Amino acid sequence: MPFGQVVLGPPGSGKTTYCNGMQQFLEAAGRDVAVVNMDPANEQLPYPFHAFYVCFQPSPFELTLTIILTYVAEVDIMELICLETVMDELNLGPNGGLVYCMNYIDEHFDWLAERLGRLQGTPGARAYDADIPVDKYILFDFPGQVELYTHEASVHNILHKLQKLQHRISVVHLVDAHHCTDSSKFISVVLVSLASMVRLELPHVNVLSKMDLIQQYGNLAFNLEFYTDVLDLRYLLDRLEAQEFGDLHEEDDDPYTQDPEELPHAVRCKQKLREKFRKMNEVLIEVIEDFSLVSFVPLQIEDVDSLKHVMVTVDKSNGYVFIDKPAGGILKDSELQSERIADFEEKYVR
Ligand SMILES: Nc1nc2c(ncn2[C@@H]2O[C@H](COP(=O)(O)OP(=O)(O)OP(=O)(O)O)[C@@H](O)[C@H]2O)c(=O)[nH]1
């Protein structure tokens, strides 16, 4: 029964970097890990190389030996379908092309099933305990376009076909940590994470990636735990309003100090818009709180503690924690989540 992670998230959120970092981390922890590239546009893969070419490159002074390393994932969906070819042959743009590619993968799932079967058959898959056979642990690197997993059916179908093949998978959904410094962007990423959780119906671990860059575009308004635990988002309401319309009490058109009938038409319109905007945010926050599903795990890809934190959370979500002997200590790990978040705050939030 293979365990694994399905890595999703908006373009540039660090999915490929995560797969590479997590593969190295898990292998160092004694697991046998394979990466499956599910992105038909992912041409440059940073995974351990499996092939290399040597060529001579003439320089003005001498012939220099250049070694070109070719990085490939253990299974690469680009062998089945490639976005560039689809765009050329069907005259589609990048987004339409990607939707086509994912539908094609869904329809030709047998190809993927056969490759995954071959992967498990390769030597290297080993057991930590003679009684418990352990298959390769698989990291699936998916494309980032949000529509693929919020309302298109293909990714949903592919993941459920994987489940039918007995793959025990958790979704790891990455979003850039710097979105926490902008209240409206934070609400948006929480909603995208929630939509993905509800749509894909799989164990889900949401990750705030690139923690080292969290304050790249500004300071956090609250402590880190507020964002990781998605606590009472109502505290963001005033900030959202001020961000959009300016600070209420510094303005002449303060509705609480003036009779609305005496205000000019433009100012009254602005106030109405402001009220509607607040109501809309209240409703969005209510949706998030009613589901009460979203929380985040912070990650900085070069920080081993943060990788371990993500690994522990994923292992609990997909059940790997019940079979993994070397990482069995995780079960005894009594470190509190809040203590961990406080550590991250100390390291990355100035
Ligand atoms: N500082 C910092 N940079 C990171 C971290 N993780 C990823 N990056 C950088 O973020 C950029 C995007 O990373 P990718 O792994 O290509 O992101 P992706 O989600 O696979 O991108 P697409 O394939 O375009 O969807 C790269 O320049 C990475 O080096 C991190 O923890 N810290």
Image (spheres, helix red, strand yellow):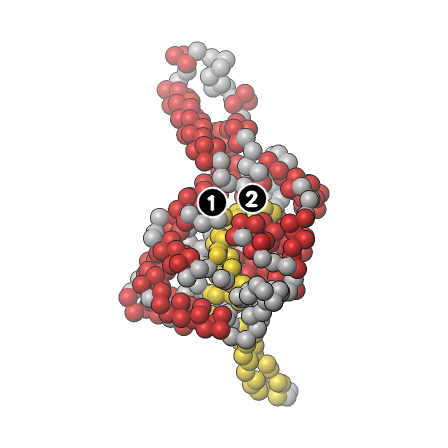
Query: Taking 267 as reference, is 180 left or right?
Result: right
Snapshot quadrant of residue 228:
top right
Q: Are marks 1 and 2 in contact (CB under 8 Å)?
A: yes
Q: Measuring 45% from the left and 49% from the top, which residue is drawn there?
A: 202
SS at badge 2: strand
Label 2 is placed on what type of residue?
Phe
Q: Which residue is mark 1?
A: 193
Residue at the outermost front position: 131
> Could you tell me residue 249's position as x and y percent?
54, 20
Q: Measuring 53% from the left and 36% from the top, which residue is drawn there?
A: 183
Specify few, some or many for label 2: CA neighbours under 10 Å numbering under 14, 14-19, or 20 or more: many
**Can residue 101 be seen at all in this image of the molecule?**
no
Q: Nearer the viewer, residue 157 or 127?
A: 127
Specify few, some or many for label 1: CA neighbours under 10 Å numbering under 14, 14-19, or 20 or more: many
Snapshot quadrant of residue 111:
bottom left
Q: Measuring 64% from the left and 42% from the top, which residue is drawn there?
A: 337
Q: Measuring 60% from the left and 82% from the top, which residue is drawn there?
A: 66
Label 1 is placed on what type of residue?
Ser
Q: Earlier in the sequence, mark 1 or mark 2?
A: 1
